[in-house]
């Protein structure tokens, strides 16, 4: 056995894993994006917020780099973020109208909880490339989305060109190798849409065969190839 495995005791299997798997499947099926403009008070309380954020820490993390951070933007700081959004729009489009600048600004004022997800591409071992670091952050974000769903909160990820702007990078004091990936918003859903249909396994999986990859899941030894 690999000696490294001795450092981490293996958890004992649950007596009956079926209910847990069913509950997790239901939770994943229930997760959906609720736009920030439809996320209202009440949001998580202080203890709930801390517990929710802790759910991100079980994400895979090669060499324990902790390459990502979650930056909370409290209500008192939202106007500064809104100004950064407006400045970012003006940076891209000097002809932006006052209404457009106001709309960009007001995006920062939505949802009770707003986080910026940041990845550091340089911290720790340089052999662990940016893709791995971003993947770790994505797993952390998915944990947060699922925990928000379990708590009954609505949630959403948002991105856009503003995240690469000089104004936003200055506001969050991002270093040259730090990347703002997305914003994560959480609150009470004022309205919800029906859960969208999920793709079938055949739409997201390919199987490698002697003739190359083919669409779909094929578990037989020699699947027919086109």
Image (cartoon, rainbow, N blue to C red):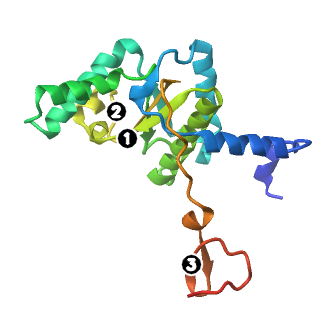
**Considering only order in the chain, which callout, 1 or 3, is on the residue closer to the N terminus?**
1
Q: Residues within 10 Å of mark 1 (few under 14, many from 20)?
A: some
Q: Are marks 1 and 2 in contact (CB under 8 Å)?
A: yes
Q: Please indicate whether residue 58 sits to the left or right of residue 132 in the image.
A: right
Q: Residues within 10 Å of mark 3 (few under 14, many from 20)?
A: some
Residue 139 quadrant:
top right
**Considering only order in the chain, which callout, 3 or 2, is on the residue closer to the N terminus?**
2
Q: Are marks 3 and 1 in contact (CB under 8 Å)?
A: no
**The C terminus lies in quadrant:** bottom right
Work out whether residue 10 can be spotted: no
Q: CA distance from mark 3 to mark 1?
A: 35 Å
Q: Residue at x 44, y 37 (%)?
A: 157
Element on which disc 2 rests:
loop
**219, 166: nearer the viewer:** 219
Q: Is residue 20 above or below residue 100?
A: below
Q: CA distance from mark 1 to mark 2?
A: 7 Å
**Considering only order in the chain, which callout, 2 or 1, is on the residue closer to the N terminus?**
2
- Which residue lies most toward the right here? 15
Element on which disc 3 rests:
strand
Q: Residues within 10 Å of mark 2 (few under 14, many from 20)?
A: some
Q: Is residue 53 above or below residue 13?
A: above
Q: Residue at x 84, y 46 (%)?
A: 18
Q: Please indicate whether residue 175 sits to the left or right of residue 34 in the image.
A: left
The residue indicated by pointer 2 is 174
Residue 122 quadrant:
top left
The residue indicated by pointer 3 is 214
- Which residue lies most toward the left here? 95
Of badges 2 and 3, nearer the viewer stands: 3
Residue 50 quadrant:
top right
Q: CA distance from mark 2 to mark 3?
A: 42 Å
Tag shown at residue 179: 1
Tag shown at residue 74: none
């Amino acid at each position: 056995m690999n000696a490294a495995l001795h450092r981490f005791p293996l958890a004992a299997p649950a007596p009956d894993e079926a209910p847990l798997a069913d509950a997790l499947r239901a939770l994943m099926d229930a997760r959906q994006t609720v736009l920030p403009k439809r996320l209202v008070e009440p949001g998580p309380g202080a203890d709930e917020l801390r517990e929710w954020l802790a759910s991100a820490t079980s994400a895979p993390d090669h060499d324990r780099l902790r390459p990502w951070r979650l930056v909370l933007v409290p209500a008192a700081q939202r106007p500064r973020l809104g100004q950064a959004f407006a400045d970012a729009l003006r940076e891209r489009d000097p002809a932006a109208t006052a209404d457009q600048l106001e709309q960009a600004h007001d995006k920062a004022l939505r949802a009770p909880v707003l986080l910026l997800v940041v990845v550091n591409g340089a911290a720790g071992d340089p052999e662990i490339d940016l893709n791995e670091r971003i993947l770790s952050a994505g797993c952390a974000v998915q944990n947060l989305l699922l925990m928000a769903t379990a708590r009954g909160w609505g949630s959403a990820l948002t991105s856009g060109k503003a995240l690469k702007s000089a104004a936003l990078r200055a506001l969050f004091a991002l270093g040259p190798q730090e990347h703002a990936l997305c914003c994560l918003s959480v609150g009470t859903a004022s309205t919800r849409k029906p859960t969208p249909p999920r793709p079938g396994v055949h739409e997201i999986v390919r199987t490698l065969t002697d003739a190359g990859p083919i669409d779909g899941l094929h578990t037989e030894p020699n699947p027919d190839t086109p």
